[in-house]
Amino acid sequence: QVQLQESGPGLVKPSQTLSLTCTVSGGSISSGGHYWSWIRQNPGKGLEWIGYIYYGGNTYYNPSLKSRVAISIDRSKNQFSLKLTSVTAADTAVYYCARTISTVVTEPDYWGQGTQVTVSS
Amino acid sequence: QSALTQPASMSGSPGQSITISCTGTSNDVGNYNLVSWYQQHPGKAPKLVIYEVTKRPSGVSNRFSGSKSGYTASLTISGLQPEDEADYYCCSYAGDSTSEVFGGGTKLTVL
């Protein structure tokens, strides 16, 4: 069974770059058949899709975040990463990485446990 | 403001059935049979309970079912149990430029 685990700093200063990594186990990112996603949840609020990447490098981003987001993939480490630039307090959230059901059904099925990121000086 | 509209809260008694709605537009729910539903308990990651409008992942109780009519998708939970108390989110594909949109979530209380 696929497992995902987020890692990265829990505290980021305003205007800096948020960087998170998701390590995948129990399956290979390079096997294809799925997109690899980032989703966040602001405190006490709903879910917001950030974007996803295919193992070949194709990316798709939420239009509202597109100018600040980059998702990349490291097949050798079976990891994918998120960078969000120029962060503000509004970017404080629990960040989840997830796998999509398939490349046709692009909603997530397996999720990581989530990691809290706080933007504060 | 979320792209998909859900009731903020609903409640039901054990044994009852409840239906949570998720209303979108012609750009998402109305145009694709790619609606999924997630159950989230406090402090936990969301869990997929329905995908492609009506399909249930392996291991999910058959008390959970999904449907869609026009721009509105629905999640029905029959025979409510205390452990069903959670937040529920819908998600829809919304085309290549937007990709995925979520609802604002519904807090279900089992009285």
Image (cartoon, grey):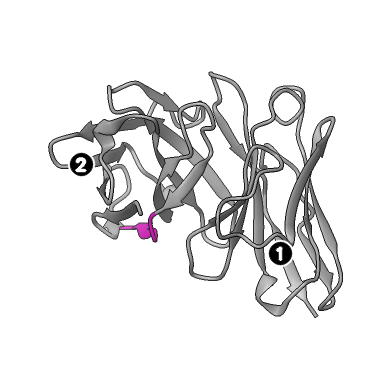
Q: Secondary structure at mark 1?
A: strand
Residue in the image at 74% along x and 67% along y: B108
> Would you say the residues marked 1 and 2 are in contact, meaning their CB atoms lie under 8 Å apart?
no
Magenta-highlighted residues: A112-121
For disc 2, the chain is: A
Task: Say left or right for A62 vs A34.
Answer: right
Q: Amino acid at mark 2?
A: Asn
The residue nearer to you, when weighing A81 against B47, is: B47
Question: Residue drawn 54% across and 19% down?
Answer: B97
Secondary structure beneath label 2: loop
Q: In this rendered view, identify the residue nearer to me: B100 or A55.
A: A55
Q: Nearer the viewer, mark 1 or mark 2?
A: 2
Q: Is residue B4 above or below residue A54?
A: below
Q: Is residue A8 left or right of residue B28?
A: left
Q: Residue furthest left?
A: A76
Residue corresponding to mark 2: A78
Give the residue drawn at x 45%, y 45%.
A39
Q: Quadrant of residue B111?
A: bottom right
Observer-nearest residue: A93 or B54?
B54
- In this image, A14 relative to B92: left or right? left
Residue at left 30%, top 54%? A6
Q: Which residue is mark 1?
A: B107
Disc 2 packing (10 Å; few <14; some 14–19; many ≥20)? some
Q: Which chain letter matches label 1?
A: B
Type of amino acid under label 1: Lys
Residue B64: mark: none
Position of A79 with respect to A67 (left or right) is left
Q: Position of residue A109 (x, y in %)?
A: 49, 47
